[in-house]
Image (cartoon, helix red, strand yellow):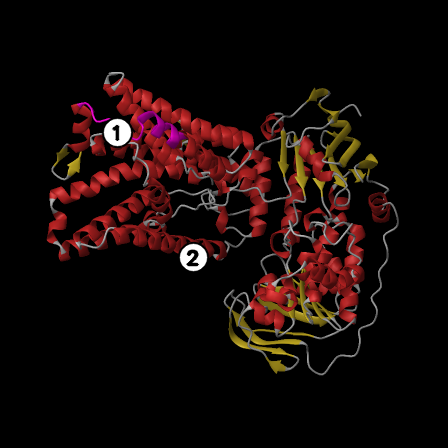
Amino acid sequence: MSRLRNLLRADWLGLLLLVLGGSAALAVVRPEFLTPYNIDVILVSFCLTVVYALGQGVIIAIGHMNLALGAIGCLVAIAFGGAMEVWHLPIWLAAVFGLLLGTICGFINGWLTWRSGLTSFIITLATLSIFKGTALGITQAQPFYRIPDAVKAFGSVRWGPLPAMLLLALPIVIATGIFLARMIPGRQMLAYGGNPNAAELSGISRARVVLLAHTLSGVLAAVAGMMTVARLQNATPAIGDEWLIASFAAPVIGGAVLTGGHLSVVGTCLGVLVVALINQALVMLAVDPFYVQVLLGLLILGAVGLNRLREARLGTTAPVRLS
Amino acid sequence: MSDTFLEVRGASKAFVGVQALDGVDLAVGSGQIHALLGENGAGKSTLIKILTGVHQPDAGTVRLRGVPVAFRTPRDAISAGIGAVHQERNLITRFSIAENITLESPPSWLGLFDADAAARATRRWLNLLALEIDPATPVARLSVAQMQLVEIAKALSLESRILVLDEPTSSLTPHETARLFAVLRRLAGDGVGILFVSHKLEEVFDLCSHVTVLRDGRNACGSRPLAGMTRADVVRLMIGREEASFTAPPAPARAAAPALELRSVSTTFGHCDLSLRAYAGEVLGLYGLVGAGRSELARAVIGVAGITAGEVLIDGRPAAIRNVTQAVRRFGLGYVSEDRKGEGLILQHSVAANIAATVWHRLRRVLGFVSDAMQAATAAPFVRALDIRTPSLAQRAGNLSGGNQQKVSVAKWLVAGSRILFIDEPTVGIDIRSKADLHDLVLRLARQGTAVIVISSDMPELVALSDRIAVMKGFRIVDTFDNTRDYGQASQRIMHAIHG
């Protein structure tokens, strides 16, 4: 019984209904919505977006933000492509190299934020420019095209409606969910995001939390960057350019609080799905793609408004009385 | 003292230009409940922050059982066996009670947080404080008093040999306080040393055996037994002179119509069928425990929340208050928030800007500009009248002392011409010297024709100030009576109204 009540209280239930209802409505209006090809398109978009959305999510969890997320993804993507094309590294080694680079970029963000005591907004705004500039400088804005077939296959193979990339995206989603909900470092990140002073007075190290969150964010951006290379079949320095809005939109639609302390992984997934569905719906209904952005903006505003309402209600719920 | 547990000798600490502590000594024995007293700014918090590893002293030593220690982080202090309840709330509101209490060392299984083990470990400490709530409840759902008890449980759960409690009872009912004291006495019996900070001297005399008083960052007395000392002795040590006795001038004759009258008012906050009268020239005291709905009532009346039923009359005429702007400008209502720093003042702005903020719409002249000179001219008379101690009108409000900040919050409303003024917890966190000053100010305001409604949880303060007292409980008024300023009589009637 209480399990059911908890489920009903979960902040993502409304979203789930929205996703299901929206899909059903779309399937009625446009029966081709349910073709395996079409579902695959939505799922591929989900796989890519959810990874970098979680990359932003772990930063939002501690009340910071990572504007350099897309720039890290871009730098890693071209490093990954370049390592295979120019240095002829085997795929696995190039992937390790990419992950390492993402880890370092994230660590730099964290270290600078921690040492300087400045907000992550300004730090990552600066590193955004540095990482992106480096990527553009190295490539002279030209993509690496000679991507090994195995990588290309990972980005294009599907079994019925299910893309191969789910094999990477799903474990990442599950791991991030368990990490934040149950593992001690994840709980410490949320504790710090919820109340930094209280967390520090409880012996939680600020340095550790900030470094950990930013490094994780770098790693997730790296994975998303390399997945995008597989999908696009080339490594272009344009990768990551359009990540910023969706990376904030999905967690926020999923109920995350920008001041930190709360991130729902299930909610983020549904937020990503909502964004993907809307994109797809507008394509199928032949709406001008430029207006998709307008709708996304409105959606963020709506989601933030809803979150505020929920917070307000949580704040004024009648307290449990003492015996 | 041979069994001295915790010893501080010659501790000094300076912050940009301010010597917060200057060679302070403190010795807490095993099993001793030791009071640490002093006015705001005397250095208590700094000393506590040194003991808990938040600050490092510039000079001096801290010894535990004779061994010198140097805490670089709060974690060091915790592992050395010093637990603390800080004055500020330090809970993660989205986390459960159990997870908050076990935050220092969460029980885990294969790296995963073990919620059941945490709940089991927690229940014992909650029982000890008679807090019968499921440990899985998120802290956000608790009342303020419950949160304070959870913080105390959290400190107890560390099973520290030294327990530092900074104003632990500020939100508790007398009943909860008594329960806490019983637990503290038992701990002391087991040999725990307790350092107890409180503004409520009654509590100190009830609980503590020794006292250290700080004044201006120095010892006014060091580790003296409390036995044989009187309240007056302690106050003299704290403020360096006698406590000023306080007599209220008589109230003027009542006007025919109350300045503010509520008739069977209900609000969206949950007040129900509530009636109240406040007269010009008088102080109406609104007493109630935390959570009784007093601040909410003030907020509803000034238009923050909706009034769903009943009538609000101002000077005998019905007033439909739709929003705060209208309440302030048209009906002359004002509200001095209990949260001075959060809601009352803009700390980065100047004293003049803070005071003039409520009348910017009147100051705005040419092309909508508000000049510093105009603000200063508006603020200056009030700064003088209220005796606000500030080097200049351009001083940032955040740099003033608590008492002076409070006066700035009051001045704001006087500038706006408030004739009905709610003052919420006028002296919370304000030292004894400024307290008397503020009491004086509140009464002066009233006698000059303002209807003042004081909300306070400090019963002696309320009884000294109020001409009439209304007692609130559970979002209703349970009793209203004329106050003779006889503490014994009034306090009995109030307690009877709440608990009887």
| Disc number for residue A309 | 2
Residue that appears at 76% across and 30% down? B12
In the displayed structure image, the side of residue A85 where residue A102 appears, left or right:
right
Q: Residue B31 is drawn in which quadrant?
A: top right
Q: Is residue A43 above or below residue B483?
A: above
Q: What's drawn in magenta, residue-wise? A: A131-148
Residue A239, x across and y down, in percent: 29, 35
> Which residue is nearer to you in this view: A196 or B383?
B383
Q: Secondary structure at mark 2?
A: helix
Left or right: B268 with respect to B236? left
- The 10 Å Cα crowd at callout 2, few under 14, some 14 to 19, many 20 or more, is few
Between discs 1 and 2, the one toward the N terminus: 1
Residue at figure coordinates x 79%, y 51% from the top left: B432
Specify whether residue B346 is painted magenta: no
Spatial separation of the CA atoms under disc 1 and disc 2 = 46 Å
Q: Give percent across and percent down for residue A135.
A: 35, 28
| Residue pointed to by mark 1 | A143
Where is residue B21 drawn, in percent x and y? 76, 34
Mark 1 vs mark 2: in front: 1
The local secondary structure at tag 1 comes to loop
- Given residues A18 and B230, the one toward you in this image is A18
- Res. A81 visible in picture: yes
Q: Amino acid at mark 2?
A: Leu
Residue type at mark 1: give it.
Pro
